Image (spheres, rainbow, N blue to C red):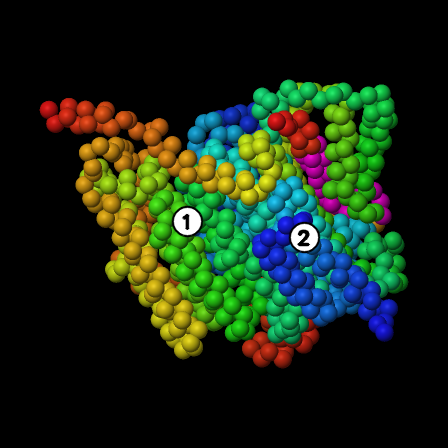
């Protein structure tokens, strides 16, 4: 049978990596834009959890010094906690941005299905590249009229 | 030396303060950004001379590495810093009605680009990479084209997933070693990082960063994003941003020094990128699309170069990146105002012979026609591949040559269109040359000058690249006291032992 | 989930492959005895170097201050983009239903408490768990809650928040630049360590955290206000 320590290890790492795998699967398989955002959030939680785990010590205390006298006991690693602080804030920024983009896309295309959004976007791109040109040049008749006056 | 932190900090300060300055004085806020970029350009250029022979390390916050974050200043990073400042100045949105937040976003992109090329700390690279990503999501999303929000959303999902994979890799590396400093990690690479977990972490990190580096197969965002943004911005993205991501991958590979199988994987991905890019570009009939996929292919070449071990691979990758920067940015700037349909290029040669000449210079150099620089670059790549004398590298050589043939097919088509006479019923392809196209002509001039002086330029780049790969030099710069007391760094055994003494010695 | 296409299936295969890879990695990873090369040194010398009791704060603001600055910039970029994308004529006229009696009395009770707790956490970041980000998020709630009770965002309020955000962010960098221009490294702590455990100790660290807290608070609240009033159709 597995020992306690091994079971704890499998549980913790299984949780963190499991979240990562669920997030990746969600990003690949889902079609609704909002659900894709949720999958991304789950993915980020998994990575953050993994980072926090790297600072774990058995029976370790929080890395806060209580008095300047000699410290008894083991402390957890403060560095991963600082890294995760940064990573969470970064994640919040990206998620807010993604949410705003979903709102804008919904306003424009009236759908949240990524396949339809992709199709509509490609239609927009191909229209864009033809429409932009015709609006900035004169009509053919004016050009040939202009050239005749140049020759004269 | 410490003031070189300003390369990153000054644009950040400008970005933060611009919204407040704009409410007080709109005039200052219009020119603050370019002023900051110009100052940073001068700073980087003067630093290039100082560190040309001996690089320097800045320990931020006064805390010695590996406790604190270290910036590693060497000629390569200063050269890239000059290029970054120059590119941002050239594509700066000068129009009077641009919102001040957009200026802030450009400054943030510039600051993070600087940070990416000089940082020597793994997590710091992640933070700057994210800053670059988030500000570029924003800049793409507010473009005026109708497809911009959707393209940005799709890019966000792909790129954010990549960033999280990057973070997962960092977490694994930290769990294995307990440090985040690149130089320190390179010392530990043969010991703690020589196992399956570390290689998996490296794979995750490269897959993550590869999104921005247009690595196959996570490069599905390229065509739609480049088609949805303005051409000068596309010049910035294709010419500069992708290179920064490749530089991050370069640092990761330098740190881990993976064995041959991993490099073969990179080689295969590079070959797939080259082939897929060239084949789609050949079928495309939209100028932006052609250039986007050509850029994917060229970056595939960079990955092929990176998979050549030792400093030759680094040199070839840097050379390819610099050449591609000049050509691709120039091409994107050149096609502002031109119609997307290549058949509408007819008559360009009559309308503006200099414009057609510029176009010709770029195309011939991209293809690799002598005597243009592109030829010498590709030739050295081919020679480097054949020196490896392994079948997979010969395969890559074949792929490179095949790609050149396919490139010739679609690029020659463009040249033919340019120099054909204009059909009567169509409007002129070009009326007056605009400022971006003048900048493109300037890039072509640089290309021609470097063609005339190719040998000295080549040697200089070789020297600069050799300094990047020189592990002992890096360790000597970042950990001078450790190096002094362990002269025999060449011997691997003494590197792995006494690692804890690094800290004691740094504190003395 | 009733029609599993080929794409879904290949996504499942890919995810399973990734799961196997990560499982193999986790077997090799040490748990609870990672080599704390940097961590041990920071625990040993953190107080001597910075004067802060909370070592995580010491890492966030002193040892890795530049990462914190980068993180602030990311939040600034995200909030700025949200503002650019969502402001417009439509946004200002969104007809939100006014909060009822329960919501408004709860908000009136909570807002001063949130301010106090938020500032407490920010000021004590170097002594107890917490700091600028955590307290800043609470402050953001304090700024934002009144908007749930029938408050229309005036242009001046948005401008005020932007001003606080800009000045707070700028002052973080300016504090760091003080050290740079007096000959030391960027973001090097100065101002003396003070007595350990006092509120006024740890040099510039509490000042940096106050800047962070104000910036995060104003930024997140303006982001939330923009999202709240965004037009849906």
* Mark drawn on residue A23: 2
For the image shown, how many numbered marks are present on the structure?
A: 2
Question: In the displayed image of the protein, which residue is found farthest to the front?
Answer: C2
Residue displayed at 87% across by 53% down: A66
Left/right placement of residue B302 relative to residue C149 reads: left
Residue B411: horizontal and vertical position, in percent?
30, 52
**Can the viewer see residue C97 in this picture?**
yes
* Mark drawn on residue B176: none
Q: Quadrant of the C terminus of chain C?
A: top right
Say which residue label 1 marks.
B292
Residue displayed at 77% across by 42% down: C134
Residue B481: horizontal and vertical position, in percent?
62, 68
**Can the viewer see residue C184 in this picture?**
no
- Who is closer to the viewer here, B409 or C7? C7
Crowding near the residue tagged with mark 1, few <14, some 14–19, many ≥20 C-alpha atoms within 10 Å:
many
On whether residue B165 falls in the magenta region, the answer is no
Pinpoint the chain carrying mark 2.
A
Numbered range of the magenta stretch? C197-222
Residue displayed at 38% across by 56% down: B279
Work out whether C87 lies above or below B136: above
Residue displayed at 49% across by 39% down: A121
Question: Which of the 4 quarters of the picture holds residue B398?
Answer: bottom left
Helix, strand or loop for the magenta stretch, by majority: helix
Residue B492: horizontal and vertical position, in percent?
60, 78
On whether residue C220 falls in the magenta region, the answer is yes
Pinpoint the chain carrying mark 1.
B
- Who is closer to the viewer here, B127 or A98? A98
- Who is closer to the viewer here, B10 or B408? B408
Work out whether C202 lies above or below C163: below
Crowding near the residue tagged with mark 2, few <14, some 14–19, many ≥20 C-alpha atoms within 10 Å:
many
């Amino acid at each position: 049978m597995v020992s306690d320590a091994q079971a704890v290890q499998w549980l913790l790492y299984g949780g963190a990596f499991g979240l990562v795998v669920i997030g990746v699967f969600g990003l690949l398989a889902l079609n609704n834009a909002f659900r894709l955002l949720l999958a991304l959030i789950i993915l980020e939680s998994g990575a953050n959890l993994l980072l926090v785990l790297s600072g774990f010590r058995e029976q370790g205390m929080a890395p806060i010094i209580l008095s300047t006298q000699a410290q008894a006991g083991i402390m957890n690693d403060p560095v991963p906690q600082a890294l995760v602080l940064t990573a969470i804030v970064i994640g919040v920024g990206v998620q807010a941005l993604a949410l705003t983009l979903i709102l804008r896309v919904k306003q424009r295309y009236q759908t949240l299905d990524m396949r339809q959004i992709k199709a509509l976007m490609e239609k927009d791109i191909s229209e864009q590249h033809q429409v932009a040109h015709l609006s900035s040049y004169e009509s053919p008749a004016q050009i040939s009229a202009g050239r005749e006056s140049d020759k004269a | 030396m410490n003031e070189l932190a300003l390369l990153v900090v000054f644009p950040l300060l400008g970005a933060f303060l611009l919204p407040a300055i704009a409410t007080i004085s709109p005039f200052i806020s219009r020119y603050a950004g370019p002023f900051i970029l110009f100052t940073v350009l001068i700073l980087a250029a003067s630093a290039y001379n100082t560190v040309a022979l001996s690089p320097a390390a800045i320990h931020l916050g006064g805390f010695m590495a590996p406790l604190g974050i270290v910036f590693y200043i060497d000629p390569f990073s200063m050269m890239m810093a000059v290029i970054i400042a120059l590119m941002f100045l050239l594509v700066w949105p000068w129009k009077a009605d641009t919102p001040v937040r957009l200026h802030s976003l450009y400054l943030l992109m510039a600051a993070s680009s600087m940070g990416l090329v000089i940082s020597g700390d793994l997590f710091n690279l992640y933070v700057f990479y994210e800053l670059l990503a988030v500000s570029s999501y924003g800049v793409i999303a507010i473009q005026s084209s109708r497809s911009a929000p959707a393209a940005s959303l799709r890019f966000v999902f792909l790129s954010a997933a990549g960033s999280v994979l990057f973070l997962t890799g960092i977490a694994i590396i930290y769990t294995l070693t307990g440090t985040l400093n690149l130089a320190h990690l390179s010392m530990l690479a043969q010991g703690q990082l020589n196992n399956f977990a570390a290689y998996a972490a490296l794979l995750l990190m490269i897959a993550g960063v590869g999104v921005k580096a247009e690595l196959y197969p996570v490069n599905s965002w390229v065509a739609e994003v480049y088609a949805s943004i303005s051409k000068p911005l596309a010049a910035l993205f294709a010419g500069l941003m992708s290179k920064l991501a490749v530089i991050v991958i370069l640092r990761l590979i330098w740190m881990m020094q993976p064995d041959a199988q991993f490099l073969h994987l990179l080689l295969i991905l590079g070959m797939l990128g080259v082939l897929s890019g060239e084949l789609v570009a050949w079928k495309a009939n939209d100028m932006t699309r052609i250039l986007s996929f050509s850029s994917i292919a060229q970056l595939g070449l960079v990955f092929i170069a990176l998979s050549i071990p030792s400093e030759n691979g680094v040199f070839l990758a840097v050379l390819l990146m610099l050449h591609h920067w000049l050509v691709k940015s120039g091409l994107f700037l050149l096609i502002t105002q031109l119609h997307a349909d290549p058949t509408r290029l007819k008559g360009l040669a009559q309308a503006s012979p200099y414009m057609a000449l510029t176009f010709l210079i770029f195309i011939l150099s991209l293809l690799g026609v002598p005597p243009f620089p592109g030829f010498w670059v590709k030739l050295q790549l081919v020679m480097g591949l054949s020196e490896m004398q392994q079948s997979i590298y010969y395969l890559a050589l074949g792929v490179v040559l095949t790609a050149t043939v396919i490139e010739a097919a679609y690029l020659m088509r463009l040249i033919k269109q340019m120099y054909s006479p204009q059909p009567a019923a169509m409007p002129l392809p070009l009326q007056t040359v605009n400022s971006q196209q003048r900048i493109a002509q300037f890039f072509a001039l640089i290309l021609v000058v470097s063609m005339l002086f190719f040998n000295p330029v080549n040697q200089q780049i070789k020297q600069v690249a050799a300094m990047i790969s020189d592990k002992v030099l890096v360790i000597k710069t970042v950990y001078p006291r450790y190096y002094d007391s362990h002269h025999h760094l060449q011997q691997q055994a003494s590197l792995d032992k006494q690692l804890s003494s690094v800290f004691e010695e740094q504190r003395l | 989930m009733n029609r599993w296409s080929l794409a879904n299936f290949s996504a499942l295969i890919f995810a399973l492959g990734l799961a196997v890879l990560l499982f193999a990695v986790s077997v090799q990873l040490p748990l609870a005895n990672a080599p704390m090369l940097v961590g041990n040194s920071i625990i040993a010398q953190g107080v001597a170097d910075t004067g802060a009791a909370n070592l995580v704060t010491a890492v966030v603001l002193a040892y890795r201050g530049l990462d914190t600055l980068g993180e602030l910039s990311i939040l600034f970029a995200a909030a700025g983009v949200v503002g650019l994308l969502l402001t417009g004529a439509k946004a200002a006229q969104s007809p939100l239903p006014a909060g009822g009696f329960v919501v408004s009395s709860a908000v009136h009770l909570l807002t001063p408490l949130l301010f106090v707790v938020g500032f407490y956490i920010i000021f004590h970041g170097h002594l107890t768990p917490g700091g600028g980000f955590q307290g800043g998020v609470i402050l953001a709630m304090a700024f934002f809650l009144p908007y749930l009770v029938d408050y229309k965002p005036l242009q001046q309020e948005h401008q005020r928040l932007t001003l606080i955000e800009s000045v707070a962010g700028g002052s973080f960098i300016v504090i760091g630049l003080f050290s740079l221009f007096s000959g030391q490294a960027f973001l090097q702590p100065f101002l003396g360590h003070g007595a350990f455990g006092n509120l006024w100790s740890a040099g510039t660290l509490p000042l940096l955290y106050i800047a962070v807290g104000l910036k995060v608070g104003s930024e997140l609240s303006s982001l939330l206000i923009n999202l709240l009033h965004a037009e849906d159709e």
